[in-house]
Amino acid sequence: MKKIYLLMLSALVVVLGGCRKDFEQVRAVRLTLQLEFPDAFIKGSVPKDVEVTLRNNITGELIKAKTDEEGKVVDTVIPGTYTVTASKAYSPEETSELLGNEEEIFVNGNLSPVIVNEEKVAVLKLKSSRAGGLVIREFYYSAITASPSYLYDGFTEIYNNSNEPIRIDSLYMGSTRAGATNNTSASAPYNFLTAYPEEVYLNQVFMVPSTGQPRFLEPGKSLVIAISGLNHKSDPNGNKNSPVDLGDADFEVFWDYPTGRDIDYPDVPNMVHAFAGNTAGFDWNIGINGAGMVIFNTKDFDKLPVRFEPDAKTAGTTQYIGIPVSDIIDGVDATANATIFLSNKRLPISVDASMTTAEVPLKGRSVRRKVKTVINGRTIFVDTNNSSADFEVNLIPSPRKWN
Ligand SMILES: [Ca+2]
Ligand SMILES: [Ca+2]
């Protein structure tokens, strides 16, 4: 028996010797990720216990780890191309030791692509952002197929995830240019991210109307904003395949295009149309391949910069308005499917460290935030400013239903 093993072993050595290159390609190598806090943090602070996810871009395999006492993750991985994301939420008490002031914050970061051929050390510089009490709880953008496709039953639901009422009159919401179906599409990169990393560029912005009286959203309550405020399932203007009734939405988007094709539903009040980057389409076409969706408050909306996309591969007439990242309350970077690289994100890392997806367009699916816990009947949703961790697919979009 021993002889046979020896023979087999020597045969193996010959085989391996003959294709040494192939053998080396599958040998696991050591990857060290060194995380660093933003410069504003107190000198010597170390990002300990930060959740780090490594995704193999080819196999899709996920490796999850937490940083050690030195802010490092050391792992052995098979050579390949990886996407690394990191995020952690800090309580006001924890933040006071790191930044000096007491407020709830997030730190986030990503590296993509990380090409690992041999032993490698990569540094991931984190960014921080404030935690807002308002979050996007659900985002339905993927629409349905029903020859022709029906694109008007989308909605965004905004939720008060805090324990105090939050003012919502004059709250803005807006979307970036739509996502692409693949990484090689001309519309895949969003060149604003490299040129203006501290701003979010939007092509449509709407605002909750203000009557002069403060309007509050209570803890555990939500605001449903419909593309069009009708019962899409039963209304003759809807489509029987739609999964949603938005006849009781809090607001709808009504845009009186020259085409006159959008309908103003009288029972649902209208959002104020604050900015239009173009006038194509018949309603707010967010895009069945997703987009970055954000909510924000800003003081001087009229003074914000308006630009064309720098070095755009697809020249167009659309202009975009730049919102400072510091004004953003919450954002979700929704994309067409799980193959889209982080380099084709629409939102900066400090707004959303990664992306989420309804996986397939035209199947009536949404993305929704995962439930973290329920305290005295009030649901609290996961919020780490990292949508791949915070969100999940909802097979049947469910406005105002989460338990
Ligand atoms: Ca509408
Ligand atoms: Ca209306």
Image: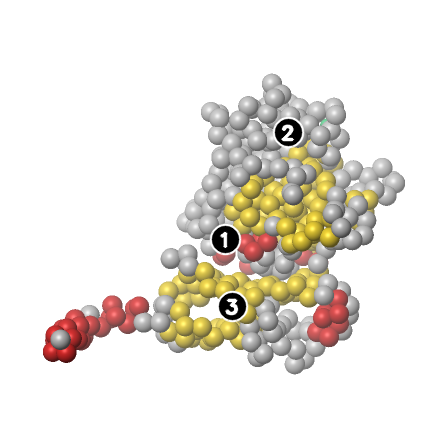
Q: In the orientation shown, which residue stands out farthest toward the front? A: 1
Q: Position of residue 370 (x, y in %)?
A: 61, 50
Q: Earlier in the sequence, mark 2 or mark 1?
A: 2
Marks 3/2: CA distance? 41 Å
Marks 2/1: CA distance? 33 Å
Secondary element type, mark 1: helix
Residue 101 horizontal side relative to residue 368, left or right: right
Q: Which residue is mark 2?
A: 245
Q: Which residue is mark 1?
A: 344
Q: Amino acid at mark 1?
A: Asn
Q: Looking at the figure, which quarter contains the N terminus?
A: bottom left
For mark 3, does the 10 Å Cα neighbourhood hold few (<14), some (14 to 19), or many (20 or more) residues? Answer: some
User: Viewer-nearest of labels 2 and 1?
Assistant: 2
Q: Position of residue 184 (x, y in %)?
A: 41, 49
Q: Amino acid at mark 2?
A: Asp
Residue 63 horizontal side relative to residue 282, left or right: left
For mark 2, does the 10 Å Cα neighbourhood hold few (<14), some (14 to 19), or many (20 or more) residues? Answer: many
Q: Can you tell which quarter of the image residue 80 is in?
A: bottom left
Q: Can you tell which quarter of the image residue 232 is in?
A: top right
Q: Depth check: 300 or 224 in front? A: 224
Q: Is residue 102 above or below residue 204?
A: below
